[in-house]
Image (cartoon, rainbow, N blue to C red):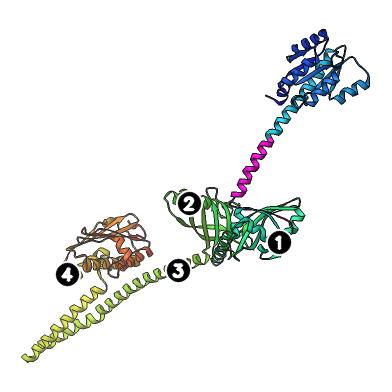
Amino acid sequence: MPEKQHLESDLGDILIVDDEIPNLKLLTDLLVQQGYGVRPAERPQLALDSAMAQPPALILLDVRMPEMDGFEVCRRLKQENRTRDVPIIFVSALQDVQDRVRGFEAGGVDFISKPFQEEEVLARVRTHMQLRNMQRHLEDTVAKRTAELAKSEAKYRGLVDNSMVGVFATTPDGQFTFVNDAMSRMFNFDSPKQMIARGSLERWRDLKDRERMLTELQMHGSVTNFEAETITHTGRKIHVLFSARQIGKDILGMVMDITGRKRVEKELQTSHDLLKHLLSSIPDAVFSVRLPERVIEWAEDSYNTMGLGARPEQVQGLSTLKYFADPDDYNNFGEIQRQAIREGKRYMRTEVILRREDGTHFPAEVTGTFYRENDEVTRITALARDITDRRQAEQKLLDYQRRLKALASQLAIVEEKERRAIAADLHDHVGQTLALARMQLASARNSTADTRLARKLDDISETLLKSLEDTQQLMLELSSPAMHDTGLSGAVADWLESQIEKKYRLQTEVIDNIPHHHRKTMAPDVRTILFRNVRELIVNVVKHARANKISVRLEDRKTAMRVIVEDDGIGFDPNAADRTFSKTSGFGLFSIKELMADIGGNLRIVSEPGKGCTAILSAPFDVDDS
């Protein structure tokens, strides 16, 4: 219910006192029609008894009555505690000012003139009823608030007495007027009374802090979160934080012991300084980025990797997109990041091109460590390292590798040429000389009759024959003459027959599937490398595979020749051979792969333990001669 409506409807009882029955009836009917409760009384004593029995909300009192006039009735009602506050409106035909003054002095609040005007009567009654109700409501409110205040005071007094925070009141000259139990315990006193007796001045380690506090208090009327070092009753130093306000001549405040917090802050500052030192010694830009927004929270760039200078805080709140040279790099980095998070990884690492503040670009390695809260990644700490020097070093290394590969290929070709030259020299000089010497010995043998000399010449001839055979064998080992006469397949076949079948008693075969009518040319150097690599593969089979059979197959693959070397030996794991890089097999395969790559070809190994091995060499043809 609204307050106004409440005030109008509350305490609606009206006592009407008039010895003239018509007037009494007229007023009664008028007010009853308006919804008021009415008690009519035609004699003064009856009115007094009724009012004392149950005080009305309002009294309409006629001034002229035979037994007792209205002024006297009013004075008596005002003398009683029960009716003192009931408003009284005098009803009179009197117009004399003195009579009205007498009425107000007696305690009346208003006058209604006879003859009655309904509007006037109702207006005055309504006004004073509202005033009366407002007064009653105010009294009730005051009583209620007074009770609440007393209750609140008791409650807060209990809170102060039992508070874990020190509460005090002191005079400006340092005399305590109140301290609670928490305050006395904080400063190692046995009781608040003991602390009050000693005063506050002894508690300050430096009285200059007290002077600063009093100055601020005088300027602003209060101090908030004022820190100071104080001394307890037992001489222990403690850091306190207090707030105080000056009320009248007293200073009231609260105190907290923050010694533990100050110790933690000091340790935290030490850790922060150490972290700052560590970060400043890292030659990388360090960022903390909020996810999933990818917004920079803070940055450290001591070595000016990103060109942030002395103010890395200027990038706080910026998107990392600004520092990617290419938006595609930004998107790809985000996908790598999300994939790492989905896989539950703790960190990620990738290389991108970044942009410095001055707009220059540089290659960077970015390593990010994920920070999780409640199993959700909320930020990433990323280190951006400038790898320009490393890229340049890698490029130099690649250049060196290419040069070494080229040199290795040239060395292999030169070696084969030297082999061929030596073989030719052996054939043209040593072989011819040995053959001529045997012919000369045969002529001498036929021309002598000395049997003993003939036997010696026969022995020398046999020795020369053996030397000639050894020379021919050496010529085959150095270079196959068939390479230039019948091609690669003939050279491989001759070498297998002379060097593998006879020496190691292995079954070998060469299958040439390249049609004779569709021959293609191959550069001599490429053919030389192929022959060398086939020889190396077969030597590895002989040494390590424990095979019984070796086959070599040549195939035409349009633009390239494939040479397939197969054996039925014990096999091996090609991946393991690459990882171990052994001198017996891994290095040989690596050397072959490098030589094949240098001539534009490749080597592919198909093998597994216990199932033999297939090595496939592919080398390009030059032109189609068909």
| Closer mark to the observer between disc 4 and disc 3 | 3
Q: Amino acid at mark 4?
A: Tyr
Secondary element at tag 1: helix
Q: Quick check: marks 3 and 2 in contact, CB under 8 Å?
A: no
Splitting the image into 4 quarters, where does residue 471 fall? Answer: bottom left
- The answer for how far apart the CA atoms under marks 1 and 4 are is 105 Å
Q: Which residue is farthest top?
A: 22
The part of the chain drawn in magenta is 145-172
Q: Amino acid at mark 3?
A: Leu
Q: At which x and y percent is residue 248?
A: 76, 50
The image quadrant where one finds the N terminus is: top right
Secondary element at tag 3: helix
Task: Give whichever of discs 2 and 1 has the lower sequence position.
Answer: 1
Q: Quick check: marks 2 and 4 in contact, CB under 8 Å?
A: no
- The answer for how far apart the CA atoms under marks 2 and 4 are is 66 Å
Task: Give whichever of discs 2 and 4 has the lower sequence position.
Answer: 2
Q: At which x and y percent is residue 95?
A: 92, 17
Q: Amino acid at mark 2?
A: Arg
On residue 504, the disc is 4
Secondary element at tag 2: strand
Residue at image mark 3:
397
Q: At which x and y percent is residue 496?
A: 21, 67
Splitting the image into 4 quarters, where does residue 545 fall? Answer: bottom left
Task: Give whichever of discs 3 and 1 has the lower sequence position.
Answer: 1
Splitting the image into 4 quarters, where does residue 119 fall? Answer: top right
Q: Quick check: marks 1 and 4 in contact, CB under 8 Å?
A: no
Q: At which x and y percent is residue 322?
A: 59, 53
